[in-house]
Image: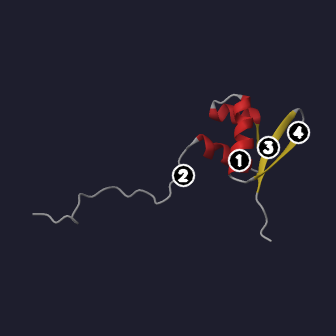
């Protein structure tokens, strides 16, 4: 008879896997040196422009408290998150 501690071998699951969510996808795109446009974020998430803008304002800035900058390059606005320097 097997004891309770002798369980069948189960595959190891990483302690903190990065799930491929739309939120994580947006955060990774914004963290790139080249940033991302609204159109880039729309393509990656399948969201409409107003949904992307709402996510940037409501989640990235308000909920997560990340600094979000934007610049205009040509006719396209590019968004980036900025890492805060420790004081």
Please say if the residues under marks 3 and 1 sit with CB atoms less than 8 Å apart.
no
Give the CA separation, mark 2 to mark 1. 17 Å
Label 1 to label 4, Cα distance in Å? 22 Å
Q: Which residue is mark 1?
A: 60
> Foreground mark, 3 or 1?
1
- Count of number-bearing discs: 4
The reply to whether dot 4 and dot 3 touch (C-beta < 8 Å) is: no
| Mark 1 touches mark 4? (CB < 8 Å) | no
Please state, as top left, top right, bottom left or bottom right, where the N terminus lies in the image: bottom left
Q: Which residue is mark 2?
A: 18
Q: Position of residue 69 (x, y in %)?
A: 82, 48
Judged from the image, the secondary structure of the residue bearing numbered disc 1 is: helix
Q: Is residue 19 visible?
A: yes
Q: Nearer the viewer, residue 65 or 4?
A: 65
| Location of residue 12 with respect to 87 vertically, above or below | above
- Give the class, few, some or many, for how many residues have Cα within 10 Å of label 4's Cα (few <14, many ≥20): few
- First in sequence: mark 4 vs mark 3: 4
Q: Dot 3 corresponds to which residue? A: 79
Q: Please, what secondary structure does the residue beneath circle 3 have?
A: strand
Give the labeled residue for mark 4: 73
């Amino acid at each position: 008879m097997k004891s309770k501690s002798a369980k069948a071998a189960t595959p190891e699951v990483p302690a903190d896997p990065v799930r491929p969510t739309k939120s994580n996808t947006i955060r990774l795109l914004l963290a790139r040196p080249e940033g991302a446009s609204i159109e880039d974020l729309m393509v990656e998430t399948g969201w409409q422009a107003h949904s992307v803008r709402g996510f940037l304002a409501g989640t990235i800035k308000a909920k997560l408290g990340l600094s979000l900058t934007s610049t205009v390059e040509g006719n396209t606005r590019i968004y980036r998150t900025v890492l805060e320097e420790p004081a």
